[in-house]
């Protein structure tokens, strides 16, 4: 067993354990934090595959932004665990079916002959100055530019839709206009009055 | 160094020797980076107290000294503070989530220290010379917010929770502007490697530094950096007049000190990155005799100290932003500015080569 193997098994064990923790933890905040750990170890595994751009982006986007907002919401919500557990047996057949389909799909990939190690040899080792980022950028903006732009437009539509759905116009809210605040001169607010001082009796 | 490598090879065999050697070497190098950094943090607190004191016409700490030497008066203060913090009890409040409560300070300081792995101190002095260095630093600094959120939630206190919420929203919004400002830098330098970014600013004088073509981005980056580290005037997460001390109100002793250390380590990190990316890192301002005699590492330290002074100056000068003003500045001012600048820079880069190779554009576009 080499050093790389040990690193892989360490990451893999932590990943599986934390992923199990996500679905078994009673406290939703703990579950969300375990999901963060799962993403982080997953990024470690991707680093072992020399996909440093994807690994760091996973940490940057999912750990640094998405999960923060997730945690934000989970902490604010007052989640009633008993009510969540009520529907467990009602939804169990559906969940079991989903799990079965997923297990079958994974078996097709892992046990099938098309994806075996002899069919898919390890890619040749890259030179030390090989830039993953540059290569991905070149592919995205040349060969797959239409797919990429389409995805961008779809995401933009989703953002606009989300804002449009939640935007409510309130009547009579009071706003401060910073540009007007900055523009205020002393003369607009204060009136200097010249008054002779009163004489002492 | 090679002798040590051979020694490892003899002890652990050909398969394990190199791996264990690089592990040991890296551990020693990490200690060599973290120890001076923590010392820098300790003396940054002293510098902050002294500088703010002078700005407010006070004297600041001037008692604690080493071995009774009078002219060192005040210099022992950070050490005395550290000893005091170590002696204090760490109080865990009733109803707090114990494990997360203890973990939160660790989660704050770990990314603050981990980000230093890719920082180059001179052309050769860098622990991990990776291609995606800038991305790595962005990822690490974005992890820092977890410590704050977890601290706020695990404390089981309303003040702490409010502070954590404020901090989370603030950090997430300013990260965007920060990232966009850095996109401009990597458009100019064609690289995510911090060493290459500094090398892209070589050319003889300070005019070649990215500060000149990206001046608005420098301002956006630096102000976002102040906001990211929750420093005044963006310190609503602590807001001692509104929510006592924000997310770390329930922390005491060393647990509080770790938050404190992380804040200052992050300040030094932001200043270091700004000086590497915009101020030419280890490059001297003019490539002529008196300046080139000073080693590059000293130039970097001078630039970091110069930017850190601004952090302290801001704190002594500006009143705290109101929360909605912070959000407005981040979303409605900084992000549009950075987006416009990215498009502008892209347009300039598409100019015909005859323009790019002519003065003044040839100073920055290689």
Image: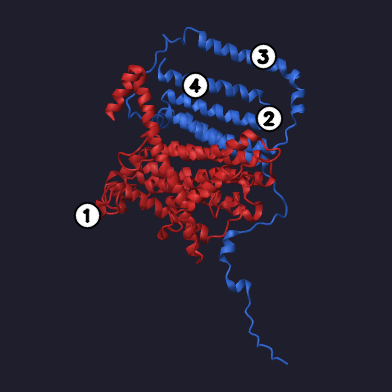
Please state the chain letter of the residue tagged with numbered disc 4 in the rendered image.
Answer: A
Label 3 close to label 4 by CB (< 8 Å): no
Front residue (pair B76, B181): B76
The residue to which callout 2 is attached is A27
Q: Which residue is mark 1?
A: B289
Chain A: what color? Answer: blue
Residue B341 percent coordinates (x, y): 43, 48
Task: Single out the mark in the foreground, 4 or 2.
Answer: 4
Q: Mark 3 vs mark 4: which is more N-terminal?
A: 4
In-image side of B252 versus B22 (left or right): right
Residue B66, x across and y down, in percent: 43, 53
* Tags 1 and 3 on a common chain: no
Between the C-alphas of marks 3 and 2, the distance is 26 Å
Within-10-Å neighbours for mark 1: few <14, some 14–19, many 20+: few
Q: Which residue is at a point 62% across and 24% down the rendered structure image?
A: A21
Residue bearing the label numbered 4: A10
């Amino acid at each position: 067993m080499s050093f790389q193997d040990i690193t892989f098994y360490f990451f893999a064990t932590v990943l599986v354990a934390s992923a199990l923790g996500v679905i078994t933890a009673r406290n939703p905040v703990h579950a969300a934090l375990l999901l963060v750990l799962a993403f982080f170890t997953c990024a470690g595994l991707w680093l072992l595959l020399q996909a440093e751009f994807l690994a760091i982006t996973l940490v940057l986007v999912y750990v640094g932004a998405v999960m923060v907002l997730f945690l934000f919401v989970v902490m604010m919500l007052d989640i009633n665990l008993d009510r969540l557990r009520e529907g467990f047996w009602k939804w169990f057949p559906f969940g079991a079916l989903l799990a079965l389909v997923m297990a079958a799909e994974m078996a097709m990939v892992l046990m099938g002959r098309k994806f075996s190690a002899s069919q898919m040899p390890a890619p040749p080792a890259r030179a030390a100055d090989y830039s993953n980022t540059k290569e991905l950028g070149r592919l995205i903006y040349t060969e797959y530019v239409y797919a990429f732009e389409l995805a961008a437009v779809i995401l933009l539509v989703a953002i606009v839709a989300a804002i449009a759905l939640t935007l409510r116009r309130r009547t009579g809210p009071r706003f401060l206009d910073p540009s007007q605040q900055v523009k205020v001169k002393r003369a607009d607010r204060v009136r200097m009055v010249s008054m002779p001082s009163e004489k002492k009796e | 160094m090679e002798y040590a490598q051979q020694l490892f090879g003899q002890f652990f065999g050909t398969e394990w020797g190199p791996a264990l050697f690089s592990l040991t070497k890296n551990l020693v190098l990490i200690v060599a980076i973290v120890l001076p950094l923590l010392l820098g943090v300790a003396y940054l607190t002293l510098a902050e107290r002294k500088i703010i004191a002078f700005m407010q016409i006070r004297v600041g700490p001037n008692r604690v000294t080493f071995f009774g030497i009078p002219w060192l008066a005040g210099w022992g203060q950070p050490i005395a503070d550290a000893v005091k913090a170590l002696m204090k009890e760490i109080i865990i409040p009733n109803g707090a989530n114990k494990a997360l409560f203890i973990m939160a300070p660790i989660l704050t300081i770990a990314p603050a220290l981990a980000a230093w792995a890719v920082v180059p101190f001179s052309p050769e002095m860098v622990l991990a010379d990776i291609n995606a260095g800038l991305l790595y630093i962005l990822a690490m600094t974005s992890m820092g917010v977890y410590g704050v959120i977890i601290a706020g939630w695990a404390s089981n206190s309303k003040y702490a929770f409010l502070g954590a919420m404020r901090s989370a929203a603030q950090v997430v919004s300013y990260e965007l502007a920060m990232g966009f400002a850095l996109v401009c830098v990597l458009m100019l330098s064609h690289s995510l490697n911090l060493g290459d970014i500094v090398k892209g600013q070589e050319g003889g004088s300070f005019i070649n530094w990215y500060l000149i073509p990206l001046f608005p981005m420098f301002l956006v980056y630096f102000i976002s950096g102040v906001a990211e580290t929750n420093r005044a005037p963006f310190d609503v997460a602590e807001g001692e007049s509104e929510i006592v001390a924000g997310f770390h109100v329930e922390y005491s002793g060393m647990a509080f000190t770790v938050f404190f250390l992380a804040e200052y380590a992050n300040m030094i990190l932001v200043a270091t990155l700004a000086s590497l990316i915009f101020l030419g890192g280890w490059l001297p301002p003019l490539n002529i005799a008196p300046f080139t005699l000073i080693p590059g590492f000293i130039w970097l330290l001078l630039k970091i100290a110069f930017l850190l002074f601004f952090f302290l100056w801001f704190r002594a000068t500006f009143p705290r932003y109101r929360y909605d003003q912070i959000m407005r500045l981040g979303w409605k001012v900084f992000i549009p500015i950075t987006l416009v600048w990215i498009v502008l820079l892209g347009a300039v880069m598409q100019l015909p080569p005859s323009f790019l190779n002519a003065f003044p554009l040839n100073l920055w576009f290689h």
